[in-house]
Amino acid sequence: MSTDTAVANQIRVHDVTKRYGQRLVLDRVSLQVDAGETVALLGPSGGGKSTLLRCINGLNTFDQGEIAVGDLTMRNPVAPQTMAAVRRSFGMIFQDFQLFPHMTVMANVMEAPVQVLRMAQSAARERAAQLLERVGLGGHLDAYPRQLSGGQKQRVAIARALAMEPRGLLCDEITSALDPELKAEVLSVLVDLKRDGLTLILVTHEIQFARRAANRVFILADGRIAEQGPPSEVLDRPQSPRTQKFLSQVLE
């Protein structure tokens, strides 16, 4: 990987602070995710994980600090054109799929490349078919979201994000609404994307997936990074009392 590519696919968060009224949600959070790295954000509910992800994607503003996505830098206030460029660079996938219910699977995946990238219909259709085949849905191109299982909907959402040819993906609890078998379907797709070298940040409660797929784990609790490092260290030999408390509750 060239130096230019490594920088373009890198995410750097420096001293980011976010408040909702009097509530401090992110307290001078700093982290770096390198190109091709898979990072899992773990921690208790309300600790700031989803807020941090939404700040990185430009969906939430933040009060202080700086976020660099490749060569794009966001500070308060974030310029609208910078925010739009960040969203094109790193796709975001949500827990609730956010598919267009009135569109077929194929149309859902084609929509953004045609409308945003101005891709020709024929090229967008070919790209969508390839991506849907890749996530195991090549036989469902004409189906509507209501005809799909939760795992299938989430795989469509992944294909839709990939259709924009992003440098990486930000995944916000994308398996939390699924039963174990459907979770396995989605997680296997993410493991394949990791092998392809896509930069991935995953907000998740799936400890075993974080252990298996992540290069590093960050524990975000009470708006701060309590601990970070390889999964084998953070999850098996945590040093921070806050991490120890969190893991004792979720691994019982």
Image (tube, rainbow, N blue to C red):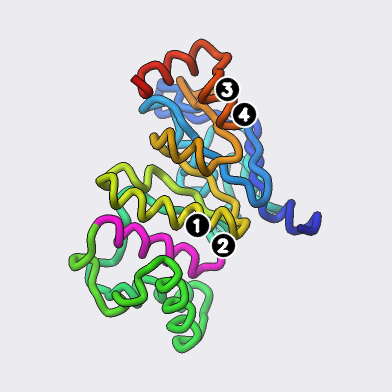
Nearer to us: label 1 or label 4: 4
Mark 3–mark 4 contact, CB under 8 Å? yes
Of residues 40 and 196, which is closer to you in this image? Answer: 196
**SS of the residue under disc 1:** strand
- Residue bearing mark 1: 91
| Mark drawn on residue 229 | 4
Upstream in sequence: badge 1 or badge 4: 1
Q: Give yes or no for residue 109 being in the magenta stretch.
A: no
Describe the element under mark 4 as helix, strand or loop: strand
Residue 157 forms part of the magenta stretch: yes
Disc 2 target residue: 166
Residue found at x 48% / y 74%: 113
Q: In the image, what residue type sits under mark 3? A: Glu
Q: Which residues are magenta?
A: 150-165
Nearer to us: label 3 or label 4: 4
Which label belongs to residue 227? 3
Q: CA distance from mark 2 to mark 4?
A: 26 Å
> Which residue is painted at 46% across and 31% down in the image?
42
Q: Real-space Cα distance between discs 3 and 2?
A: 28 Å
Main SS, magenta residues? helix
Q: Name the spot of residue 187 as percent of width and height, x first.
A: 42, 50
